[in-house]
Image (cartoon, grey):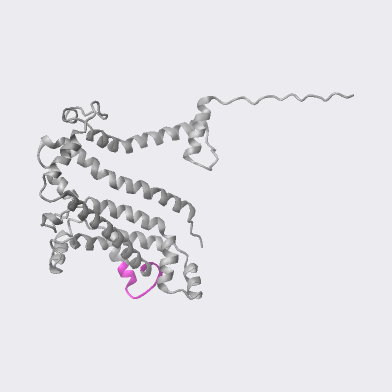
Amino acid sequence: MKQKQKTLVIPKPQKSLAYRSIKKIMKLIQPGNALNRSLGGDVILLLTLLIFGMFTAYPMVFIINNAFKPLSEILIFPPKLFVRNITLNNFRDLIQLMAESWIPVSRYVFNTVLITVVGTAGHVLFASMAAYPLAKHIFPGSKGLNKIIVYSLMFNGAVTAIPAYVIMSQLGLINSLWAIILPAFAFSLGLYLMKNFMEQIPTTYIESAYMDGASEFKIFWHIVMPLVKPAWLTLIILSFQTLWGTTGGQYIYDEALKPLSFALNQIVGGGIARTGVVAAVSLFMMIVPVTVFVISQSSIIETMAHSGIKE
């Protein structure tokens, strides 16, 4: 009987642990993409991302740690990044000061939630409805309106403060929540953003819907709006962050109508003794916008990756 010849298998040289670790990290950073750089290039890219990530995260880490520092650690110089003796006294003092207010805290929270939710929803809706004809229809004066929208982005809010107050006064909206909500509907940045996104939608989609008998509203709601989902999700984040921190001091004088941010600013204006309360307020005002941003960011990235629009 013939004996089977054994083939000699030469094992491949094993990569170092550091090399394999860097490859795994880079695959997490760029999922599904083959790495075509050298090991040195991967290391440089990874270090660059870590440096920029630390610079970005530093303010947030500093605010979180300050909220749990005692007053002696907050006032120390040079300031320390991390807290040494964790305390909840800052939050206890904040709750106590809010409890002593003659307006219930729940009223401030209700005003803020109402302004933020209604203002954001109205801004997204009106900006989208106004952007659709400007982006996909040609009518007399459309070019002039587009120029006005671009020019309006050049003016700071302080420049238009007096005309805005005069308009609100003529409409009888001074000392009401609508004085903050209605101007939020007309933020020109949202209209500009939605118009630019809608201009990228192929006209063939709309023409095909016309041929199938779809109405203008149905085309807008069922075809255009799903295709520009990244735009209105981004708009929700921007509008929410703007309205969440508004004080409304230039329009609202009644204490029962003021938002939560105005009440918190009154509390922290008590001098250096309330520095710890200021840190707690900063953390509280940051949590909600950051949470909304984190939740919406995943949807934006997923939509941008899977909703490519091609002619």
Residue, x 29% and y 38% (percent of image)?
60
Residue, x 15% and y 48% (percent of image)?
263
* Number of numbered callouts drawn: 0
Q: Quadrant of residue 148?
A: bottom left
Looking at the image, residue 287 sits to the left or right of residue 7; the answer is left
> In the figure, 296 relative to 75: above or below?
below
* 132, 272: nearer the viewer: 272
Looking at the image, residue 296 sits to the left or right of residue 16; the answer is left
Name, please, the residue furthest toward the right.
1
Residue, x 36% and y 75% (percent of image)?
139
* 75, 191: nearer the viewer: 75
Q: Quadrant of residue 174?
A: bottom left
* 311, 183: nearer the viewer: 183
Residue, x 44% and y 34% (percent of image)?
46
The stretch in magenta equals: 134-145
Q: Position of residue 267 (x, y in %)?
A: 13, 43
For the N terminus, the image quarter is top right
Q: Position of residue 63 (x, y in %)?
A: 25, 37
Q: Position of residue 58 (x, y in %)?
A: 30, 35
Looking at the image, residue 184 sits to the left or right of residue 10; the answer is left
Q: Position of residue 136 (x, y in %)?
A: 41, 69
* 39, 26: nearer the viewer: 26
Q: Is residue 221 magenta?
A: no
